Amino acid sequence: MTPYRLVSVLSVAALALSLQVCGGGGSSSTDTGPTVPVPVPEPTPEPTPQADAPLSASCAALGQGVPEEEAVCTEGPPHFLDEMNQAIERVRSEHPGYFDGRNVLNVGGYYVEVIRNLDKMGLCADSDGGEVGVKKTDAYNDQFDILTGKDEYRTGENIYIGSCAPAIFPRGGRRPWPVPDHCSLPASDFVACGRPESRYYGHVEAAIDQMLSEHPELFDYSDINPGTDWPRITNPEAYQLAVVDILVEKGYCTIFDGEEITMKRTNDFSEHYDINVKDVYVRRGYGIYRGACYPSAF
């Protein structure tokens, strides 16, 4: 999942100071001294986005992992099984809204909070949305599988997959998307994605409504997607980019990667939307929401 304009201007009026000089000898006269202009400050530059604190400070203190083919991986015994089970139980306790029974409603949030809990224990952890690697040094790591294919959380001895020496994670460098110019947030890289309840869907639908109202030239109502009232888009790229501009005006950091619109207001997560059907018709309804990535995907 793939996974612009803030300007500040200062206007200051220059002031002139008159210096009064007094003469001696029983008489006085007033003389106008030289004009001293008050310096006009330069416009305050836009602050450079500062990198977020690492998701795992424990990982920041260690090195990168080696390619898996350069490591020796075995099936045991585990080094960090107890800590992993504790981390999962802590997420369940502190974030009950992430779960419905054993089903994980917020997959990205689940992975991120497990990693944070392990970090609090002094352990480095990372994931690509599948297995979770855990290490304390670069000498070796454990691999865990903490989610079923049905998005149910897993605990117990069977979550342990094996161990590798040297450690095979983190590898880094997954996301190619740069931060857009209009966004003051630093770059971010996601750990995992899922489809929790959307927080931004209403604003995206409102942006589509605005486009349909203000730019009828971008739509052909003589050609409607069968079974809907969604018109053909005459210029899909212009349509997508115009929706991005509307969302930027609403205060979102937003990009269009050629397929989906990705938006964020913090680096905690990003939401992803597909607002057309095969680059032919407008797409409406909650189906435009494709999911969320934690942390943000750009």
Image: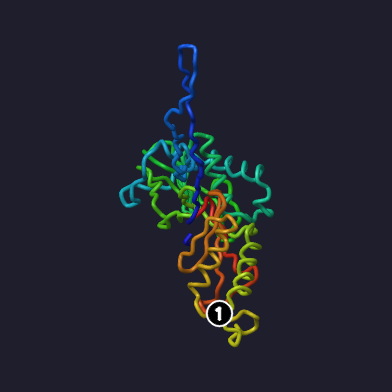
Picture layout, residue 189 above or below residue 77: below
Residue 198 on image: x %, y %: 63, 59
Colour mapping used in the image: rainbow
Q: Nearer the viewer, residue 97 or 243?
A: 243
Name the side, left or right, on which 209 lies relative to 37. Answer: right
Mark 1 neighbour class, 10 Å CA radius: few under 14, some 14 to 19, many 20 or more = few
| Residue that mark 1 sits on | 217
Residue 242 on image: x %, y %: 53, 68
Name the side, left or right, on which 66 lies relative to 294. Answer: left
Q: Quadrant of residue 223?
A: bottom right
Q: Amino acid at mark 1?
A: Glu
| Residue reaching furthest to the left | 70
Label 1 SS: helix
Picture layout, residue 136 above or below residue 285: above
Residue at 56% in and 56% down: 252
Q: Nearer the viewer, residue 85 or 291?
A: 291
Residue 47 on image: x %, y %: 46, 43
| Residue reaching furthest to the top | 25
Picture layout, residue 219 above or below residue 51: below
Residue 72 on image: x %, y %: 34, 47
Residue at 42% in and 45% down: 163
**Figure label count:** 1
Q: Nearer the viewer, residue 151 or 4?
A: 4
Name the side, left or right, on which 91 lies relative to 187. Answer: right
